[in-house]
Image (spheres, rainbow, N blue to C red):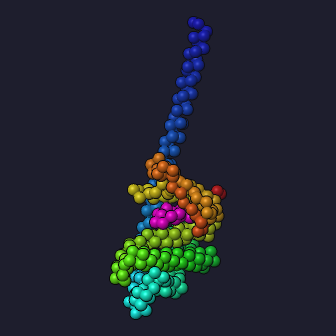
Amino acid sequence: MNLELIREKVEDNLHARLLLLIIPKLMAEHIKKQVDDFLKNQEEERLQEDFLEMNEWYLGRYKGNLQKRFKEMYAEVLANMKKKGFKIAFAKYKEDFDPDKWLFNRKPWYGTLTADGKALTAAPLERGGNFELAELGLSTSFDMEDPRVIEWIATNSKNAAFSITNTQYEKLRRIMMDGIADGEGIPAIRERIIDQLGLELKRAERIARTEVLKASNRGILLAMEQSGVVEGKQWVAAFDARTCPMCAQMDGATMPLGDAFFEKSSDPVTFTGTEQVPAPEGGLSYVFDYEEIMAPPAHGSCRCTLLAILRKV
């Protein structure tokens, strides 16, 4: 027999044996990866569903309270418009009319909404904290006396109160000035204000969702810090027809526990989205000039949450 032919047959036999050894291993690794990915996705979906479900009651309470405050705020302005002084000023100084004299007083509203915020975000924050400790398998309770907890509730409530109050004030001021510019009388301007109130009552749900989920996520983050067993955090998005390109792109992003996903900056950050949830041509740009983003949300009505990355033993 030809020696070259014998050598080729031996090599072919060796290759066949190697393939018989390697292929099952490669297949097992591939299958294991698929199973691991499936279980990870299932766990993230379960986490996201639990996160949203546990906050629904708090969201409804925040929304109802804010709608009540909007009605009181607008009622104050409408009552001022009924005063004799308003009618005289409106008729006499129409071209130089100063709406600031007839809108609501912002200072008391800063205090009222700050107090509301503290009362309405403390509970979802604590719930988020205890939820996370349970997820980590720890039997300890979330520490609401932690100075970081107290400081965050106070600061966030104040910031939200000032933002909500100033936004409403400027909207009402613009409505009055636009009405005057269009030559409208007091009844027509009152109708504009009433119409705007209807829009704000609907917008209350968006604000409530943002503030409640923000508090709950902060509780989750602070619980990770309190636990002592977490070294990092992962961004987890909610995927459905409402998922935005930014959240889709952020899904799975990780950071060390004490680092921000986005630093406070006036520079825009552009998101292109993903293949499944693409952004419009040119991308979507966000500016995080109000605070650093340590945890979701990163925009209004964001439904994202966090997943803990445990310390390696």
In front of the other: 235 or 30: 235
Query: Looking at the image, which residue is at 56% across and 24% down?
Result: 15
Q: Is residue 108 left or right of residue 147?
A: left
> Is 93 drawn above or below residue 25 in the view shown?
below
| Residue 54: percent from left, percent from top | 44, 69
* Res 15 visible: yes
In front of the other: 204 or 82: 82
| Residue 106: percent from left, percent from top | 51, 84
* Res 54 visible: no
Residue 73 lies in quadrant: bottom left
Q: Is residue 76 left or right of residue 18?
A: left
> Is 61 drawn above or below residue 47 in the view shown?
below
In front of the other: 39 or 70: 70
Count the labels in the image. 0
Q: Is residue 212 left or right of residue 186?
A: right
Query: Looking at the image, which residue is at 63% across and 59% down?
Result: 256
Query: Looking at the image, which residue is at 55% across and 54% down?
Result: 270
| Residue 52: percent from left, percent from top | 44, 66
- In the rendered image, the quadrant that contains the N terminus is top right
Most common SS among magenta residues: loop
Query: Looking at the image, which residue is at 50% across and 37% down?
Result: 27
Q: From which residue to which does the magenta span run?
A: 295-308
302 in magenta:
yes
- In the rendered image, the quadrant that contains the C terminus is bottom right
Q: Residue furthest top?
A: 1
Residue 17 lies in quadrant: top right
| Residue 274: percent from left, percent from top | 49, 49
